[in-house]
Image (cartoon, grey):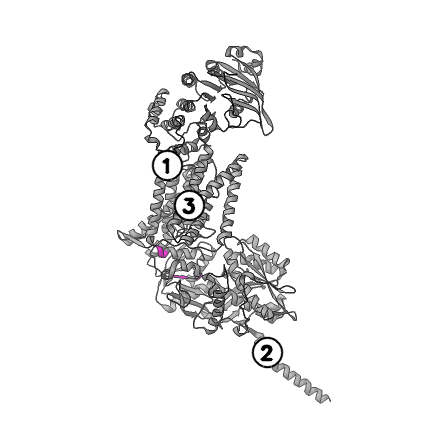
Amino acid sequence: MRKVLKSVSFFIFLCLTASLFLIGPALAGGEFKLEDMSDMSDFDPNNFQNPTGDTFKIGVLQIFSGPGAGNGELFWITTCWVAHDINKRGGIMIDGKKKLIEVIKGDTMGKPATTKKAAEKLVLEDKVDVLWGTSGSHLALVIQGVADRYKKIFHQSLSMSDSLMDEKNFNKYTFQTMWSTNQVGETTAYFYSQRKKEKKFYIICQDYLFGHSLAESFKKGLTKYYPEAEVVGEDYHPLFAKDFAPYLTKAKASGAEVIFTGDWLPDGGNLVKQARQLGVNVPFANIFIDEPNALSAIGPEGTKGLVNLNQYMGDANNEKGMAFGNKWKELWETKWEAPYNTLLYKWPGGTIGYAVETTYWMLDVFNRAGSSDPEKVIKVWEGDVYKGIGGNRLEMRACDHVVIRDTYATEYVYPNPWFTELSSGTEVFTIPAEKSMPVDGARCK
Amino acid sequence: MSPVTAMYVAQAIHGLTYGMLLFLVASGLTLIFGMMGILNLAHASFFMLSAYFCYQVVAWTDSFWIALILAPIGTGLVGIIVERFLLRKVQKLGLGHIGDLLLTLGIALVISEAVKTIWGTESHQVLIPPSLQGLVTVAGLEYPIYRLFIIGLSLVILGALAFILFKTRLGMIIRAAVSDRDMVSALGINMPRVFMFVFGVGTLMAGVAGVAAAPMLTVFPGLADQIGLDAFVVVVVGGFGSLLGAVVVSLFLGELNSFGIQFIPRLAPVLVFLFMALVLSFKPMGFFGERDE
Amino acid sequence: MSTSILETKDLFYDYSGLQVLTGVNLQVEKGERHAIIGPNGAGKTTLFNVITGLYAPCRGKVIFKGQNVSGFKPHKLSRLGMGRSFQITSTFHNLTAFENIRMGVLSRMGIRFNMFQRVDKLKDVTRETDVVLRRINLHRESAVPANALSYGKHRALEVSLAMSTNPDLVMLDEPTAGMSRDETHSAVDLIRRLTEGKTMVIVEHDMDVVFSLADRITVLHHGKVLAVGAPNEIKNMQEVKDAYLGHGGV
């Protein structure tokens, strides 16, 4: 009898061990699988239906009013897309039961004080399970403070400053899936060092902390990967500048072969537009001048030769990515109405792509943690590896919670398969993750 | 022309372009202040409103030229309505400058919310009309036709304004009213009507600038911010109510901007304010200040 | 009744609770030079401003040429024939002497409606302006901006601006304030010359000016009319002396 019991328990032990080995990989990391995605044909971004009852709540912190409200609009569709999909799949497993995803807006109005208020309201009144956002490192920092104080997970998906996760600002509740300025600098420098076509660079950035630190990262990257290159001039202009002509005239006279700019819109678009109007045809290496509506105003000729660097990029040669992109585009063509029917929303490339992708990742992490208890989520997300929309690898560095991933560069050409109104990238150059690393925070040494 | 000379000449023309645009905005602001004693905080909002009108008219008619005529007129009409039905009523309450400031600030906010409600918060694009696209080459220097067009347009308006102010009876009245509007009405002139006219013309000129700027910039809700600030500097430095001051200082600021960026880029964004502080510490009434109240 | 050009009936005005005019009854006869005097704070300037339409009366009436004009705007009163000057020098100091006078000449000639007409092309206006400048001895300074004129000439310009609409009644608010003795002297001469045969109301501090110019005087005290009479009568009235002249030592 004893023997029988012994052998049964040994057998059970064996089974358990085997199953651990079998399930192990699934526990260790997730993956976005297109075949699991719901039929999204009933998804209407203008009319997203939040589920009721006991839900899992995402608090989206963005500018939902004022001049920057277009931002809120953009990240509303990306978050709701993921929520709609997951809800049709039955939700995620939290505390032993499936919960549907609810999306709640928090209007930052682009100001620190309102950001703090909005984040606190989401935590205290709406009782969200996770905070999501936001554009502007100074605002992200405010939310990090709130996350730390109330012990809420903050998925920092949109701000790029290197300092957000440094020794001073790091807190264990915040996870940054946005690439950082150092990654941008290395990406750009590495791309040009491989291409070896241009050697003279001119920097035009916005005159505030972000613009300056991006320029520094780029110069650092050049020293590291492309020491033969030369920075022939640099200028910093005020935000929402009205006339770029003086900068452009200087840049042209400097003999620069490429102008590197970190400008976001509308400045970035105005910069390129005025350059073309002035007959300055130097290409721009940029990270934010990929917004199709702004580019279409400059036209196919003017947008030729732009080099866009991004952490997510539509690539016609990537089957998985294209399959997802085509589904999105079909709905754009047939279903969506204003404001979601403009060129901006045609393809889920760039910003839309990484916002969607990292939101899938975030929900997958919660699902695997099986809980919204931050301690459990932290345990799962730290060091987690996730396969993104195009099969690309996303890794959450455990020591300082920043993302490590391949990045991309592309040169705009016309014609291209994406748009008839503007130039766009067809050939995508991948910069391997080890060549575009975030700064090694003190915590990682 | 050597490339270096070409660069300096181009910078000078850039300065002229922006200076003229600034003049169109600042001249209305200074006239309205000089005559009516009203610091119109909504002035730059009319500039932005006109850019939106331009965008809309182009969307309907596909013609920049029609927009160039209709948008400023529409803006001027809005200005007249504001003066006639709001400003005049508030002035009657006798709250002094506080009343005007609050009202015009309120109008600025209403315009900014209205454009967001009507046209959304995204950026809109206006294209340069085909006939003004491209570059011309003068003495080896390539320069965009559209920017030259802006300079020409502004010169025409400056000329028309100077003619009205210095040659016509209305101009006499406006200039006289800058120094003493009570005495002008004691001479039998219906000042409220003149005020309405001046307010309308001032907003109309801001409107012309708005249309002219639209194809160079994007039409978005923050469009008015920077030019509005610069226009206030022009009015303060040039002297409240002085048209000559507005012309001179606008052009000077345009050049200061261009050559500041050329030679001392790190300081360029604050040069305007340094200049203002410098002038005001020596001439508190501005260069051509005429009002002595 | 029929000879008075300007009348106020039981005029009240208060300044946010402070009663400034408490029932003023004033009568100005056609063709006379009428002075309003009174100690500081008697309400002279307020009365002046209510009559000229700058303030609307709280109660009572202003009757001008037989018409109730209470609350009429200044430009309307001007068109009805009431000219005025201000206590603060009220020329257009950024315009030249010539342009100043031309403003008045233009409004007298009634070219009100064609606002876009070129003024420098109006020959008769230019001619008339020159005549006025010569009359007030300013023809040599016609191209000088008003604020560059000497104080006396500046005031002369001002009075003549007030007269330039050829009004039936001209209201002058302390026309000699701040002038030297000599300047006052010539200003009084000028005013007398310019207002020959006109009706004039003057608010004045300087008793020499009042007694040399006025045909009749109204004394205001505490917002009411204390006395009315010829200069000689006023000089000798005991209550006027008590209220005002007593301390002044005239």
Taking A247 as reference, is C60 left or right?
right
Q: Are marks 3 and 1 on the same chain?
A: yes
Asked if the magenta segment contains residue A279, the reply would be: yes
Q: Are marks 3 and 2 on the same chain?
A: no
Q: Amino acid at mark 3?
A: Pro
Horizontal and vertical percent position of residue B285: 43, 36
Q: Name the front one of labels 3 and 2.
A: 3
Q: Depth check: A350 or C171 in front?
A: C171
Horizontal and vertical percent position of residue B283: 42, 36
Mark 2 crowd level (few <14, some 14–19, many ≥20, 10 Å Cα): few
Q: Is residue C2 above or below residue B196?
A: above
Q: Are marks 2 and 1 on the same chain?
A: no
Chain name for mark 2: A
The magenta segment is A275-287
Q: Depth check: C138 or A1 in front?
A: C138
Q: Is residue B244 above or below residue A263?
A: above
Q: Is residue B278 visible?
A: no
Disc 3 on helix, strand or loop?
helix
Q: Which residue is mark 3?
A: B72
Q: Amino acid at mark 2?
A: Ile
Asked if the magenta segment contains residue A394, the reply would be: no
Q: Name the front one of labels 2 and 1.
A: 1
Give the CA distance from mark 2 to mark 1: 86 Å
Disc 1 on helix, strand or loop?
helix
Q: Which residue is mark 1?
A: B164
Horizontal and vertical percent position of residue A264: 45, 58
Give the CA distance from mark 3 to mark 2: 70 Å
Q: Which residue is mark 2?
A: A23
Horizontal and vertical percent position of residue A56: 62, 65
Disc 2 on helix, strand or loop?
helix
Chain name for mark 1: B
